Amino acid sequence: MSAEIPVKHLTQLDTALPAFARLLRIMDELREHCPWDKEQTFASIRHLSIEELYELSDAILQEDWEGVRGELGDLLLHIVFYARMADEAGRFDIAQVLHTLCDKLVRRHPHIYGTAVAADSGAVKRNWEQIKQQENGGKPRSVLAGVPASMPALLQAYRMQEKVAAVGFDWEAAPQVWDKVQEELGELQTAVHTGDAGQMTEELGDVLFSLINYARFIGVNPEDALARTNRKFMQRFRYIEDAAQAQDKALKEMSLEEMEALWQEAKKKG
């Protein structure tokens, strides 16, 4: 089966390719003439790339589509920046980056570009992981090799669980996972009663890991769920702060009962 590009998307190429070429020219000019851009290295903009990714995440959560467009541009700038610096060092160029990506996408979608069959998204994910295992030149590769060590712990747990599930290491049904959550909660309470800080830390980690697993089974992304709760908490607490300011009162001067009443008002407002 060969994939054909819809006419609409072919038309978009007429505008997208010149725009991308313009970005490459601007990157060349900045790298050659701008004092700041000339000084940058892979290491110096790494933390900025991470910051841009979080800004994109914020815009997505807020459904700020103008913001999403801008943040996608910032991320694209960083990709072009890295490729330009690599080209200067004789390592690779932007064309090689793009071809490497295209080759990987074609290779890992044999149900689109080959004869394989994938009836649903679960099959696609399993095929993806199996093909990744075959891409290491025959050398053994850990299923978890692609999970970044520096990834935030909640996301890291979720990705590890997804990856091992794709090769069959998984629970059979959600109720089993919920039983495991209950078991881990009991072990946490036992640790709390002992007062052993190390054991409490370990058991709390097990509770969180089990809850993340349960979230995956019920089809909820735990990162999205926690981000939504964080935003909700922030909005409601700011309501309390605004009310305190309107009363010309410091938060510390408010009783817990007063703050709780305001919290309930904020809940009613959504």
Image (cartoon, helix red, strand yellow):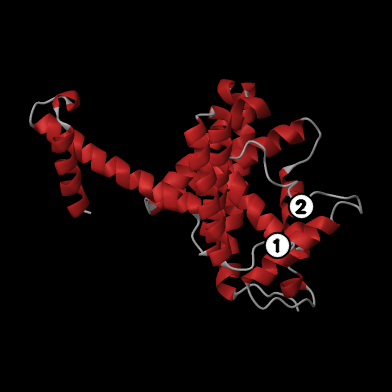
Front-most of residues 260 and 93: 260
Estimate the x, y position of residue 138 in percent, counting from the top left: 92, 54
What percent of the width, then of the height, locates residue 86?
74, 34
Where does the N terminus fall, quadrant-wise?
bottom right
Percent of width and height locating residue 225: 43, 53
Q: Neighbour class for label 2 at 10 Å: few (<14), some, many (≥20)?
A: some
Give the residue type that dot 2 points to. Val
Disc 2 is placed on an element classified as: loop
Sequence-first tag of 1 and 2? 2
When asked about the image quadrant of residue 29, the answer is top right
Residue beneath disc 1: 166
**Residue beneath the point at 59% across and 51% down:** 158
Q: Along the line of sight, which residue is nearer the eye, 84 or 208?
A: 208
In the structure shown, which secondary structural element does the residue marked by tag 1 occupy? helix
The extreme right residue here reads 138
Indicate the amino acid at tag 1. Ala
Residue 143 image label = 2
- Callout 1–callout 2 Cβ contact below 8 Å: yes
Q: In which quarter of the image is the C terminus?
A: bottom left
Question: Residue 148, relative to residue 9: is it above or below?
Answer: above
The residue under the point 18% across, 41% down is 260
In the picture, the disc for residue 124 is none
**Residue 266 shown left or right of residue 34 in the figure:** left
Q: Using the rendered image of the protein, determine whether residue 22 is visible from the camera's viewpoint.
A: no
